[in-house]
Image (tube, rainbow, N blue to C red):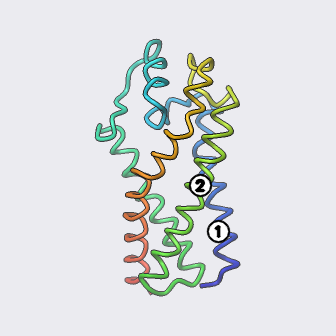
């Protein structure tokens, strides 16, 4: 592995993930991520907006998460190969490392700082819910599960594809 490439890719991947989360919010479509919000925020939002399925196993949520798995696996596989991965363990380790970095960034900065303190990123009609947006434990639980499940799936898929290609 070429570690300088790994760190550059970690920065790029974090920037891409941040854009994927923030652009819908800034373009007036924060509801795209409503399934990632605490239940009390969802309930307040759906008082004045059309309800969409947000349960973890709803078709909408499964489709969004599955699309994310495919997209992230493809990006991480390409990144792993660029960084010199040439085995299952190199690919899986690369994917896991970047997944942990992005997960930490998402939790500790995007969720705990931006969404907790900047009302511009909040769902319409929930701007007043400072306490609900500041729930640190809710976001940590999300990283632990299902985040750890996604880490295992994406890392295994990335490692397997790297092993097949290289």
Residue to which mark 1 is pinned: 9
Of marks 2 and 1, which one's residue comes earlier in the chain? 1
Which residue is painted at 49% across and 36% down in the image? Answer: 33
In the rendered image, the vertical position of residue 24 relative to residue 119, given as above or below: below
Classify mark 1: helix, strand or loop. helix
Of the residues tagged 2 and 1, which is closer to the observer?
2
Give the label on residue 104, or none: 2
Residue at the spot 47% in from the left edge and 37% down from the top edge: 36
**Quadrant the C terminus occupies:** bottom left
User: The N terminus appears in which quarter of the rendering?
Assistant: bottom right
The spot of residue 7 in percent (x, y) is 68, 71
Is residue 71 toward the left or the right of residue 120 in the image?
left
- Tell me, yes or no, whether the two marked residues, 2 and 1, touch with CB atoms within 8 Å: no
Q: Report whether 119 appears left or right of 85.
A: right
Q: Work out whether residue 130 or residue 76 is closer to the camera in this orientation and state it.
A: 130
Residue extending farthest front: 137
| Residue 111 image position (x, y, % from top left) | 60, 40
Q: Nearer the viewer, residue 56 or 104?
A: 104
Percent coordinates x, y for residue 11 in the rendering: 68, 62
């Amino acid at each position: 592995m070429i570690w300088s490439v790994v760190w550059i890719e970690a920065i790029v991947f974090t920037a891409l993930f941040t854009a994927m989360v923030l652009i819908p919010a800034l373009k007036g479509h924060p509801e795209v991520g409503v399934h990632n919000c605490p239940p009390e925020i969802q309930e307040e939002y759906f008082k004045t907006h059309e309800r969409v399925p947000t349960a973890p196993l709803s078709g909408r949520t499964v489709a969004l998460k599955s699309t994310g798995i495919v997209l992230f696996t493809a990006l991480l596989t390409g990144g792993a190969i660029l960084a010199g991965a040439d085995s299952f363990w190199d690919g899986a380790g690369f994917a896991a490392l970047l997944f942990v970095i992005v997960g930490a960034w998402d939790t500790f900065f995007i969720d705990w700082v931006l969404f907790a303190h900047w009302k511009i990123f909040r769902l319409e009609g929930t701007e007043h819910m400072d306490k609900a947006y500041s729930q640190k434990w809710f976001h940590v639980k999300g990283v632990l599960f299902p985040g750890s499940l996604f880490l295992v799936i994406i890392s295994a898929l990335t490692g397997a594809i790297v092993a097949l290609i290289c």
